[in-house]
Amino acid sequence: MKIVFDATVFRADYSMQGAAWRTFTDGLHVVPSAELYVPEVVLDEAVNGFRENLKEAWADLATAEKEVDRLLGMPRPQADDRDLELPTKEYRERLMRRVREIGGRFLPYPAVEHRKLVQRDLARRKPFNEKGAGYRDALIWETLRELLAKGVERVILVSANTKDFGDAPLLHDDLLKDIEDRRLISLVKSLAALNEELIVPNLKMLEEVRERLESSRAGIFDLATWLETAPIHLLRKHTEDLAQLVAGFPRGVGVALPSEILEAQGLRVLRVLDLTEHEVLVRMEVRLYVKMVLQWRAEEAINHPEVRKLSEGAIDYAVARRDIAAEIRMGVDLVVNHERGEVVSEEVSTLESDHARFDYGGWHAEPQEAEIWAIKAALRRAERDRSTTTEEPTRNQPGA
């Protein structure tokens, strides 16, 4: 079995240290037939993505530093000459080392004629899109074809690019036409989804550890302390999604900035799985009541009724804001070193409210999924309304 990563796997976690990456690298030994391959075009694309993200982060940092200096009245020299080349070079070396540590190999650029790619582009055959974009994806696809030509093993492409490669597990028909035996290749939309298919089912469950952790919030690590500090930091990585979750805002409109966890309830430790001699994978769900600030551009109220409804009484500046308290149901994957009693990696797997649900096993939730979840949530609310005779105030309403 050959596993091929595209650049979206690295874009989802440039550090390669998140729970999905740790589960894959630590648990790959349970699938002895699996071999990891990374096309060199993916390597180049991932390194460039890291460089662009670092450049943007440094620009944001410079802006923040200037604002701090303005507030304090203490101007300092600004580091406008930050060198991108050295950290980019170091990241490339780190990525290559990480892949090779788990036995992965890099595949050279494919030996494909330019004429062939141009013809495919002009015919608008996938992975090219209607506007002709998709050159790097085409190189990835030709690399996969060369890999398939070397043997009859199954090949799994891990890519969140469902628009151009297909709707997992099936590839686009344009691509399947290039393959003699379509059963030999499949598409998985994320590293987390790959783990669910190949690794997690083969890990040993530690039921006694799970029960002790859920009942006493102790055992292999101090879960009670983790619940006091970690959730707020995890939520702050998803401020745009939170605006949709807590207020039903359209995607891309507004942000919700968590400031405090008011209460954590309903903890469920779903599974504890044995990864290595010293590490386990802990999967759990918790219901959080979160205090946050909802922010949006004032002009967005003109085009979106969801925003217009909340704009009444909001502070009337270019950026409007409102303090709210909301209920969020969060799923989390933790990699825990039970020998040291510490969490070495943590990652949100799901965020859910009555407005929407995001499943980060797919690298990023699709808008359609959120719309479907909103319909289901509306049905649940209607069912609750029918089953109650008195209306009680709820904590998950904006403005509560």
Image: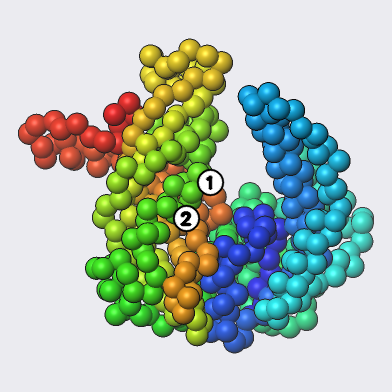
Residue at position x 26%, y 55% in the image? 266
* Whether residue 150 is situated above or below residue 71 in the rendered picture: below
Vertical placement of residue 286 versus 147, above or below: above
Q: Secondary structure at mark 1?
A: helix
Residue 20 in view:
yes
Front position in the image: 379 or 100: 100
Kindly identify the residue that appears in the image at 81 percent across and 72 percent down: 107
Query: What residue type is disc 2 on?
Result: Val
Discs 2, 1 touching: Cβ within 8 Å: yes
Task: Determine whether 215 is above or below 84 in the image.
Answer: below
For the point 33% across and 60% down, which residue is it? 224
Residue 111 appears in which quarter of the rendering? bottom right
Residue at 18% of width from left, 40% of height from top? Answer: 383
Determine whether 18 is above or below 394 in the image.
Answer: below
Q: Quadrant of the N terminus?
A: bottom right
* Residue 272 locus on image (x, y percent): 38, 74
C-alpha gap between disc 2 and disc 1: 9 Å
Q: Nearer the viewer, residue 241 or 75?
A: 75
Q: Nearer the viewer, residue 320 or 176?
A: 320
Q: Secondary structure at mark 2?
A: strand
Residue 243 visible in the shown view: no
Residue 99 on image: x %, y %? 71, 73
Q: Earlier in the sequence, mark 2 or mark 1?
A: 1
Labelled disc at residue 204: none
Disc 1 marks which residue? 237
